[in-house]
Amino acid sequence: MTRTQSLLEFAGADHVLPDAVRADTLRLLADTLAVGSAAVDAPGANEILQAARLMGSGDEARLLGTSEKLPAPAAAFVNGYRIHCLEWDAVHEPAVVHALSTVVAALGAAIDRRGGCDPDEALTALAVGVDVAAGVGLAASSGVAFFRPATAGVLGASLAVARIDGAPLDDTLGLAYSSAAGTMQAHVEGLATLPFQVANAARAAITASDLAKAGFPGPKDPLEGPFGYFALFDEGELADYTDHLGSVWRISEVSVKPYPSGRASHAALGKLEELALEPSQIASIELACPPLIRRLVARPYKEEMTPAYARLCLQWLSALMLTDGRIDPRRFTLKDMCNPDLAALAHKFALVPDGNDDPNALFPQSLTVTLADGTSTVHEIAATLGSPDNPLSVEQSGKRLGLARELSRTDIDPRIFEDPLDYFTRSQGHGCQSHD
């Protein structure tokens, strides 16, 4: 049996999630739905919606945060964008994959189109899809060049959808791979094209399952073949993931993001929130960190940033945290970016090399704070806030959820916040299955 066959066997197996894994899956589903509902009015969301409406008419699947419905591929497209566009979505840090974003968007649309789903069946499909997406990322040894949340995400999402649809897994995986796309260029330029790539992956996952179910063939060696994933998208060994299939559920390794900003900013932001420094007393702040952190969030502050750029500018984010005690995307405006007090604070923050040359490492990190009186303190950061090793407190989770509610529209389906599993598996008015 090849490693790809082992992956497909795992993806199609009749799993019963351990209680702790089921709880993690439900918690992260709730997190993802809340984040998506908060982004209905985010920059770029309206343009994505307008394009999705041109993909066809029909009311198969709901859009997160509103009552509108679209054909399943179009709904997955919109929801994928909404989930990722605020940079608030959960991430498997070692894999560098926002695995839930693509999987939840695609799987939710497939469940709606089907008319509902048994909750345990839905949670198992979600856990499997996240496992594959994160696992492919974990198997990579090269730095991120292609946008892994999309390229690995479409693989996991397609298999989650195929479980629900009853589509052939091998053809679905091959077709999903044939649809894989997305690079880091949008990240470098600070554009909303980045979440568009997640949206496209979610739509492609639905289409791959549909084509496979219709009998359309896909490549049978999409991961290990001479032009497969690990030949073109990432260097790595699939065995590094498949040798551990089933012994570890990767969804339990996923981190939530306390702030709507790039994950690489969160170790420093969490420490700054904890320290609650008086801005007027700060002379300088220096973050010593690995190259991936600097690559992702060391872009310089400037007055006219796009929101997508600002979410990945740690200088700007640190100024907001020091001033507001939180990161509110409604502050990503030209007026705020030109605020001289915020600009002065932003320029006091610097990211510097720490001597680590691992292209995928996120740690160690250390924050050196120098005050106006000349005193200096060093704060070692062992784990990013929101990770399994540094989980959010009840108070921090409440603040995060409160901001998501603030950003959501008032006519939102209340189940997104109050009963997310019911929302995900039972679409009102579709003649869905009972949970009894």
Image (cartoon, grey):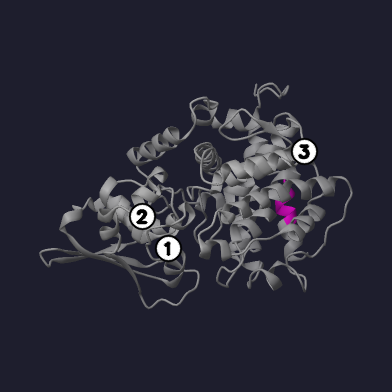
Residue at 62% x, 49% y: name it. Answer: 102
Q: Are marks 2 and 3 in contact (CB under 8 Å)?
A: no
Circle nearer the N terminus (2, 1): 1
Give the mark nearest the N terminus, 2 or 3. 3
> Which residue is under mark 1?
297
The residue under label 2 is 317
Quadrant of the drawing holding the C terminus = top right
Q: Residue at x 61, y 50 (%)?
A: 130
Give the position of the N terminus as an image quadrant.
bottom right
In the image: residue 102, left or right of residue 187:
right
Q: Which mark is residue 248?
A: none
Quarter of the image for residue 164 reads top right
Front residue of 384 and 74: 74
Queried whether the magenta region covers residue 6, the answer comes back as no
Q: Is residue 105 visible?
A: no
- Secondary structure beneath dot 2 equals helix
304 to the left or right of 189? left
Q: Is residue 381 left or right of residue 242?
A: left
Tell me whether circle 1 and circle 3 mark residues in contact (CB < 8 Å): no
Q: What is the residue that sits farthest to the left in this orientation?
A: 373
Q: Which residues are magenta?
A: 8-13
What type is the residue that disc 2 sits on?
Leu
Residue type, numbered disc 1? Val
Residue 176 position within the rendered picture, expressed as x and y whole percent measured from the top left: 75, 55
| Residue 398 percent coordinates (x, y) | 37, 36
